[in-house]
């Protein structure tokens, strides 16, 4: 027996492939959508992984530092370092801001860290780590910055000395790492204007500017111009330490919140990007329905264009099974072409997206499966119509 | 290939029910012997197509009896469980317009019938080629249907009707779209095939050019058949 479906397809191959390509672009959008979601989750995981921390210590009753603002005093790390099982402790600050760079505004996440402590940038793809205690920066390559470039952040100029990769905030903003002290100043201090203002006010306040107490005014002004807050304290545990026990210790005795790696992932994936992923899921569902409707429509039209041939096939004794198989095989071929085109399109245009798009093989396999299921379901409409065709119509009047 | 051809007794067909019912066939008696080509002639609306549809097992008669190739296929009710199998193996159809499958080439349009009956592809194609040769269209064996002339298409559809060597061929106005020379050629071919394959053939026609070629003619008027001797002119 010859394969009727493939004969029909090859007879009008151009039309068929063209239709498949149209469907393919739609499938490509769907796969990209899934890739965007995967990229978001992966960004979050990499963000947590690359910090090199086992515990995140943040302000009590907050989901900080990424999902909610958190602020803790920067001297608390000393007492945390004393807890058994704690190997290293690092203060970090996070601040999302705009920086001007080559005449263009770029959104970055400014990260203040202590070199050598948890929170420092991981693997560098270019340049060197920060060695000076001030005004050097390591930037994520996505910021567009290059080693040796100078950028202005608030009051100071920084030299980019190194580049990282895949270090972006949960919003997709590239990270810019600078020394903790600089970051604290940037984050918690006012600009020059405000600073001068504040100094004048302090000087004008008789309580701080007493003629009988020399040095008081200077001390007060100094305390006002330094900050003692950070957003989180990152903890690295010694091998074999029980993270849950240490986290519980910190929560109980220090009046701070402590999250383990998996809890942090949970916060990022389940809470912070939850709305975004629901949005994407909604989009995926709509795209699936639209694709199904389009496949059904195409297959139905293709079948209805063959009413006469199908009537003749029935008249000369072709079984329903043969006719149904022909229609279903065409639907599956269309889905297969569409999937291949879609997979290629998604792979081609993924790097162009501003945020990371992660195309997983398992998503592709799942996508293929769903496409084929949709094709089978969509073809049942056409098959039912075909089986209703009366062979007598082939004889005519 | 049976010796009995077609036998019809007291066939009736009523379309619809009640006030709108149409008695398309009131009483049809008819026989066609193997190797014989019989004409079926009648005015428009007289029931010719209805009769072919009943014989072709695509609509169910209301009453009567039909034998095809020695088997009773209908006697008040269908006597055959699978009508499609009956059509595939025992009945060849030739229509006014050839109704070939456009996405198959000439050979496979003919070979499709034996293939549907389970004959292996190579043997089905060999049989198709043999028929195409007999019908003088073998040189177009690999052509697409859309590349054939009307007369060639009609010959291919006759080849298809013969492909499973059915005991019966039903032809509904097979010469209508053809000029007189080609129309006579088709009739000549049907006569030759009837003899060669011992097939009983009914040809429904309005076509004045071919009526004199039949040896026997059935007139159908108002749902009833009347038998008449034809001129039986040679073609
Ligand atoms: N499906 C149907 N339902 C109801 N009435 C029908 C149906 N098919 C045919 N008829 C009626 O049955 C009668 C016979 O129709 P039929 O098609 O057999 O005529 P015919 O001899 O083939 O005519 P023509 O030469 O015009 O093709 C006509 O009156 C027609 O209107
Ligand atoms: Mg008719």
Image (tube, coloured by chain):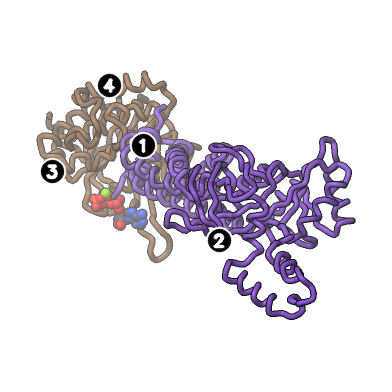
Chain colours: A purple, B brown
Q: Nearer the viewer, residue A252 or B52?
A: A252
Mark sitting earlier along the chain (3/4): 4
Q: Secondary structure at mark 2?
A: loop
At label 1, counting other C-alpha atoms closer than 10 Å, the crowd grade (few under 14, some 14-19, many 20 or more) is some
Q: Position of residue A219 (x, y in %)?
A: 74, 66
Q: Chain of mark 4?
A: B
Q: Secondary structure at mark 1?
A: helix
Q: Callout 2: 10 Å neighbours few (<14), some, many (20+)?
A: some
Q: Which residue is mark 2?
A: A154
Which label sits in the foreground, 1 or 2? Answer: 2
Q: Nearer the viewer, mark 3 or mark 2?
A: 2
Query: Label 1: which residue?
Result: A9
Q: Which residue is the site of mark 4?
A: B129
The residues bearing labels 1 and 2 have C-alpha atoms spaced at a distance of 65 Å
Q: At 82% from the left edge and 58% from the top edge, which residue is drawn?
A: A256
- Judged by depth in the image, the label closer to the viewer, 4 or 1, is 1
Image coordinates for residue B73, horizontal then vertical, percent: 44, 37
Please state which of residues A292 and A38 is positioned toward the viewer in this rendering: A38
Q: Residue at x 62, y 69 (%)?
A: A195
Q: Please determine if labels 3 and 4 lie on a single subunit.
A: yes
Q: Earlier in the sequence, mark 1 or mark 2?
A: 1
Q: Choose top left, top right, bottom left or bottom right for residue A67.
A: bottom right
Q: Quadrant of the N terminus of chain A?
A: top left
Q: The residue tagged with tag 3: helix, strand or loop?
A: loop
């Amino acid at each position: 027996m010859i394969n009727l479906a493939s004969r029909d397809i090859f007879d009008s191959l151009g039309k068929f492939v063209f239709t498949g390509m149209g469907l393919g672009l739609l499938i490509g959008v769907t796969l990209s959508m899934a890739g965007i979601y995967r990229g978001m989750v992966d960004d979050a995981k990499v963000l947590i992984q690359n910090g090199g921390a086992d515990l995140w210590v943040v302000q009590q009753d907050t989901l900080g530092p990424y999902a909610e603002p958190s602020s803790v005093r920067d001297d608390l790390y000393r007492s945390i370092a004393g807890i058994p099982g704690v190997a290293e402790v690092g203060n970090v600050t996070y601040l999302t801001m705009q920086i001007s760079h080559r005449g263009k505004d770029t959104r970055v996440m400014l990260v203040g860290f202590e070199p050598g402590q948890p929170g420092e940038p991981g693997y560098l793809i270019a340049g060197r780590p920060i060695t000076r205690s001030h005004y050097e920066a390591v930037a994520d390559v996505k910021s567009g910055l290059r080693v040796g470039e100078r950028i202005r952040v608030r009051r100071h100029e920084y030299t980019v000395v190194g580049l990282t990769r895949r270090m972006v905030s949960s919003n997709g903003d590239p990270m810019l790492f600078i020394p903790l002290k600089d970051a604290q100043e940037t984050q918690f201090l006012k600009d020059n204007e405000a600073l001068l203002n504040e100094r004048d006010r302090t000087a004008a306040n008789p309580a701080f500017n007493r003629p009988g107490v020399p040095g008081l005014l200077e001390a007060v002004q100094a305390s006002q111009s330094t900050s003692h807050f950070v957003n989180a304290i990152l903890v690295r545990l010694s091998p074999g330490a029980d993270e849950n026990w240490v986290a519980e210790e910190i929560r109980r005795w220090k009046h701070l919140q402590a999250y383990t790696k998996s809890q942090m992932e949970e916060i990022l994936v389940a809470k912070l990007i939850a709305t975004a992923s629901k949005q994407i899921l909604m989009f995926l569902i709509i795209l699936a329905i639209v694709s199904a409707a389009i496949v059904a429509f195409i297959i139905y039209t293709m079948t209805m264009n063959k009413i006469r041939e199908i009537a003749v096939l029935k008249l000369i004794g072709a079984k329903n099974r043969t006719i149904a198989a022909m229609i279903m095989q065409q639907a599956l071929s269309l889905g297969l072409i569409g999937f291949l085109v879609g997979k290629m399109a998604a792979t081609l245009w993924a790097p162009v997206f501003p945020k990371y798009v992660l195309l997983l093989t398992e998503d592709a396999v799942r996508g293929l499966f769903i496409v084929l299921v949709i094709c089978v379901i969509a073809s049942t409409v056409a098959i039912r119509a075909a089986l209703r065709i009366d062979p007598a119509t082939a004889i005519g009047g | 290939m049976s010796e009995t051809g077609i036998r019809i007794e007291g066939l009736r067909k009523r379309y619809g029910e009640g006030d709108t019912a149409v008695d398309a066939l009131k009483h049809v008696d008819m026989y066609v012997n193997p190797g014989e080509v019989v004409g079926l002639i009648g005015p428009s609306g007289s029931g010719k197509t209805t009769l072919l549809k009943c014989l072709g097992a695509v609509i169910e008669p209301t009453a009567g009896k039909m034998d095809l190739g020695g088997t009773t296929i209908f006697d008040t009710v269908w006597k055959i469980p699978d009508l499609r199998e009956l059509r595939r193996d025992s009945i060849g159809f030739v229509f006014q317009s050839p109704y070939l499958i456009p996405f198959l080439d000439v050979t496979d349009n003919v070979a499709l019938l034996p293939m549907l009956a389970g004959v292996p592809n190579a043997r089905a194609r060999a049989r198709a080629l043999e028929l195409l040769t007999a019908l003088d269209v073998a040189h177009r064996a690999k052509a697409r249907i859309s590349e054939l002339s009307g007369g060639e298409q009609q010959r291919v559809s006759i080849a298809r009707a013969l492909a499973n060597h059915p005991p019966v061929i039903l032809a509904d106005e097979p010469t209508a779209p053809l000029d007189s020379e080609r129309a006579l050629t088709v009739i000549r071919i049907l006569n030759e095939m009837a003899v060669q394959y011992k097939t009983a053939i009914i040809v429904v026609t309005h076509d004045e050019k071919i009526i004199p070629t039949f040896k026997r003619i059935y007139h159908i008027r108002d749902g009833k058949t009347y038998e008449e001797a034809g001129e039986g002119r040679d073609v």
